[in-house]
Image (cartoon, rainbow, N blue to C red):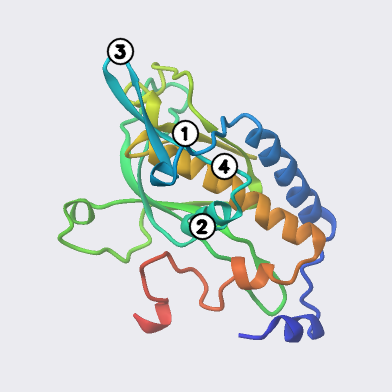
Amino acid sequence: YKSSASRSRRGFSPKPTGHLAKRATASIHDVMDLAGQVTFQKSPSAASALQHRIHIDNVCLEKFVFNPNNLYQVELLIKETINRCMVLIWHPTPSKGRSTVAPVRVKAWVELGTQLRTRLVQPKFVWKIMTEEEIQGTKSCVSNKGLQKTELLDILRVLEVNEIDRKKYPFAKKCSSLMIETLTQTLFFEAESAVARDKLVVGLKLVIARLGSKIVTGDESVFDEFFSPFGNVDPGRPPSMFQ
């Protein structure tokens, strides 16, 4: 694995050209526009820096509190989003002629990119349908069966779900659902809680904005943060060369 200086000498500069530059710039604009739609609140105290509770009609709802001026929280959320696996419920969008599709439990993570001799494999958002053994915790499956992915720079929007089309997603919980719109499809996921949903929404926006800005500005640290010499590795699992 070469250093940033070595990569530059060999001609691997993150300076974007053509299609990649347009995608990176578009991703930054889309994500930052969306960031303005998130309600950012300052933490009322150090003890509740990340969450607080609101009581409405005796119902307790957890809310994620994000302060964009807190650089430590921003860095922590970016690293957490990149370096962890998440268990989500995926509600596939039914195709024409089908009323609904049964939701499935998936494991999701951000897959780092890979630098090859002649090209770069871009970082991706990946989700994989979990087997019954994985759900029960009796077996850790390393198969790629049911694996799906989309490049981070292909993501146009990451949104909280305020209204649900019950004809398409009859079983989804609005308070913990999110939607990811890409160039080719719309992905509907449900997190384990409202806090987990909010952290994923904000975290993905920050990760995409960070990746796009580093590519556009030609920042060579993008290789250290978003690319791995080990290829496709999900967090918490050793690289294939060690399996």
Per the image, label 1 sits on a secondary structure element best described as: strand
Please tell me which residue is depicted at 38% across the width and 20% down the height of the picture: 99
Tag on residue 76? Answer: 2
Per the image, label 2 sits on a secondary structure element best described as: helix
Foreground mark, 2 or 1? 2
Badge 2: how crowded within 10 Å, few (<14), some, or many (20+)?
A: few
Front-most of residues 38 and 217: 38
Query: Which circle's residue, 2 or 3, is located before the other in the chain?
Result: 3
Could you say where residue 185 lies in the image, as x and y percent from the top left?
A: 56, 37
Identify the image quadrant of residue 124: bottom right
Front-most of residues 93 and 226: 226
In three-dimensional space, the C-alpha distance between marks 2 and 3, rounded to whole angstroms, equals 34 Å
Tag on residue 67? Answer: 4
**Left-right relation of 222 to 172:** right
Front-most of residues 221 and 122: 221
Which residue is identified by label 1? 178
In three-dimensional space, the C-alpha distance between marks 2 and 1, rounded to whole angstroms, equals 21 Å
In three-dimensional space, the C-alpha distance between marks 4 and 2, rounded to whole angstroms, equals 12 Å
Identify the image quadrant of residue 192: top left
Tag on residue 57? Answer: 3
Q: If the image is split into quadrants, where does the C terminus sit?
A: bottom left
